[in-house]
Amino acid sequence: MIEHVDYHALDITSFTMMIGAAVRAHRSAGSAQAEALEFDLLCNTLNVGSWEWNLRTNGFAWSPREYELFGIDASLDRIVYDSWRDAIHPGDRDRVEAELARAIVGQADYHSVFRVQRHVAGQVPTLHWIEGVGRVQRDEHGAALQMHGLNWDVTAKHKALADLEASRNCSNCLSHHSKNPFQAYFEQSADCLFHIVETADGRLQYTAMNPSGLQHAGVPIDQILGRTPSDVLGNEVGGAIEAGMRMAIRSGKPFVYKPTFDMGEGSVVYDAVYIPIKNESAEIVGVLGCARDITAGRQMEETLLQAQKMEALGQLTSGTAHDFNNILQSISSALDIAEYMKTPERRENALVLCRNAVKCGKALTSGLLAFSRREEMAVGPADLNALVNAMADMIRLTLGGRIELHVEADPLLWPALISEQQIELAIINLAVNARDAMPEGGRLTIATRNVHTAEVIGSLAPGEYVCLSVADTGTGMSADVLSKAMTPFYTTKPAGKGTGLGLSMVRSTAAGLGGELHIASVAGQGTAVAIYLRRVQAMSDSELGLVRS
């Protein structure tokens, strides 16, 4: 048997002539058996499957090779239309059926290339590309009676052509002057790199993926090319990738986010960017994707965040011990009053005071416990004004009686994309720093405002942001200290009074939310810290899911 035939080098007409020979064999009473045997031998030699479809009875007759091509058990009593249709890849079914329908009504001979998913017991399903041709036999009035056709496997040819196209696409992503360096980077990079194009019917198809990307996806290159992310990675992971790609295509700008995906062996956190590629006419011709595995770095950040929580909790505990004592004194006094009051009304008033004191203590304790818990940070749109107002009493207890707290909230404040726990931690850190900078007392102002800028702010592009600022009237910082203030573990506090992680963690929080941290300080006058956060506008569910990643 011939192992490989270059089917693309054969004229499709030759195959239809073979089909015609088979039809004539059925018509010929004297030589039908001999013609059929000769035709079967030819198909077996070329490794081709043959089929016959009776359009009147909807009955099928397949050769043994046809069963193998479609991955269907040859021991089945009867092949029906749905057996053939279900074997075809869902992404190709409608197109193949339309091509078949055009042949039946006489618009064209049947010729199609499509994918099938072969299922073999005990083995991983494999994707194969099948090419097929067919001809309709009609009666003297032109009515379709039956179809005869051939199918053959073109997976190897398709893979070779796809590899060539992928190489061509990748080379065209950058200018011709950098083909070789880019190709080397593409093949050797530890990042997951891939290229996607949008087809005329709106599907996003892979045209290239580097070895690192294939390793993360867990499938070979021939099961990537020509397929969508949802085809390869499933609706959850692939759907998120496609949503990000569409945002990049729609905006014409790079889309950056940090998704967490379940890749089979556990959750993986990626730092991903999708860059739209434009031609000379500024038309988007594809999207280049890069995803870096930052799982280990994220785990380290979480460990540092928990350590900083514990430090801040210690600061909070020492700052609120006196307030807990006041609460206990209030409870004790109220109980004494209740014990000696003889009228029910005065006794009830004393009990109300006692219950109010208990509520204060419960609220303070609940805040400290919630603050210290280690759990996933939920990111989403939130009202910063409501968050700051809810924290105000706790912050006042932390600052002590010598420091005034002023809250200046913009009543028309936009919603911001935040993790409430991370922003609470940032505010507490900044409040504790401000308290330590005002040993003789002073004023702490927490303000919120909308910011629309046409200029670049640090690493932020021009646009609309929500600003949360914390300003004090304390000792301030010299230029030298200010230049080192956000360096991890740098501190001017005495030994045992701080780890130097406060401002660095606040900056990390802002950056992780797609924002920016700015500090202004003058020695002897005070310090102002501004956190710029992304404004959240109307988004689809898929887009909101991306930013929440």
Image (tube, rainbow, N blue to C red):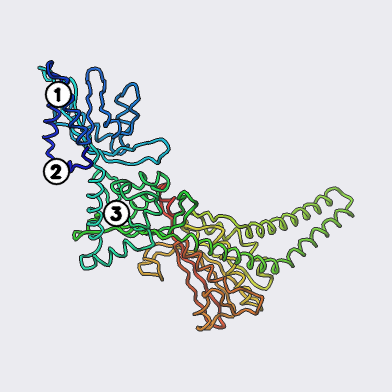
**Which image quadrant for residue 53?**
top left
The label shown at residue 255 is none
Work out whether mark 1 precedes mark 2 in sequence or the reverse, and give the earlier one. Answer: 2
Closer to the camera in the image, 69 or 434: 69
Residue sitting farthest toward the top:
29
SS of the residue under disc 1: helix
Q: Residue at x 57, y 63 (%)?
A: 303
How packed mark 3 is, by other alpha carbons closer than 10 Å (few <14, some 14-19, many 20 or more), is many
**Three-letter code for the amino acid on which mark 2 is drawn:** Ala
Q: Quadrant of the N terminus?
A: top left
Q: Which residue is mark 2?
A: 9
SS of the residue under disc 3: strand
**Which image quadrant for residue 495?**
bottom right
Left or right of 91, for residue 300: right
How packed mark 1 is, by other alpha carbons closer than 10 Å (few <14, some 14-19, many 20 or more), is some
The label shown at residue 208 is 3
Look at the picture and state if 184 lies above or below 495: above
Q: Which residue is mark 1?
A: 35
Closer to the camera in the image, 469 or 481: 481
Closer to the camera in the image, 267 or 137: 137
User: Between marks 1 and 2, how big is the CA–CA gap?
Assistant: 26 Å
Look at the picture and state if 9 lies above or below 251: above
**Residue 233: x, y in percent?**
39, 47
SS of the residue under disc 2: helix
**Three-letter code for the amino acid on which mark 3 is drawn:** Ala
Look at the picture and state if 397 lies above or below 120: below
